[in-house]
Amino acid sequence: DYDVITNSFNGIVDLLKKENRTIVFQTVPPFEFSEEGGALMKRLNGYVKTTLSQKVDFVFDCNRVIASKEDSAKPLYGGHPNKEGAYKWGVALAEELKKFL
């Protein structure tokens, strides 16, 4: 799963780079994962923040807003997130994009 997903991330980024686009990537948000799913999510987010961040213009870590501080795979606002979590995520992303753009 990890290799398939990271290859997909890279493919998306490569396509956008060919079109000379500004690329903003977000981390994988928390859901109500199994232990295995949470471990994969954390591993993918590590890849996004360390490796993929070198290929894109900006990475937004949504987990700093909508995930538990103790365990980033655990959602604070439900697994999707709920309306409150979506609002907080959107406001935080908008603030970061204002700085970036």
Image: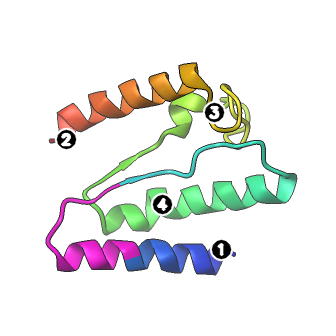
- The residue carrying pointer 4 sits among few (fewer than 14), some (14 to 19) or many (20 or more) residues within 10 Å by Cα, namely many
Amino acid type for the residue under numbered disc 3: Ala
Asked if the stretch drawn in magenta spans residue 16, the answer is: yes
**Residue 75, image x and y in percent?**
69, 33
Which of the 4 image quarters holds residue 15? bottom left
Gap between marks 3 and 4, in whole Å? 16 Å
Q: Which residue is mark 3?
A: 67
Frontmost residue, 75 versus 42? 75
Asked if the stretch drawn in magenta spans residue 34, the answer is: no
Q: Which residue is mark 1?
A: 2
Q: Which residue is mark 2?
A: 100
Residue with the most extreme right position: 35
Q: Is 10 above or below relative to 93?
A: below
- The residue carrying pointer 2 sits among few (fewer than 14), some (14 to 19) or many (20 or more) residues within 10 Å by Cα, namely few
What quarter of the picture does the N terminus occupy? bottom right
Checking the image for residue 48, the label placed there is 4
- First reached walking from the N terminus: tag 4 or tag 2: 4
- First reached walking from the N terminus: tag 1 or tag 4: 1
- First reached walking from the N terminus: tag 1 or tag 3: 1
**Residue 84, image x and y in percent?**
55, 19
| Label 1 secondary element | helix
Gap between marks 3 and 2, in whole Å? 23 Å
Gap between marks 1 and 4, in whole Å? 12 Å
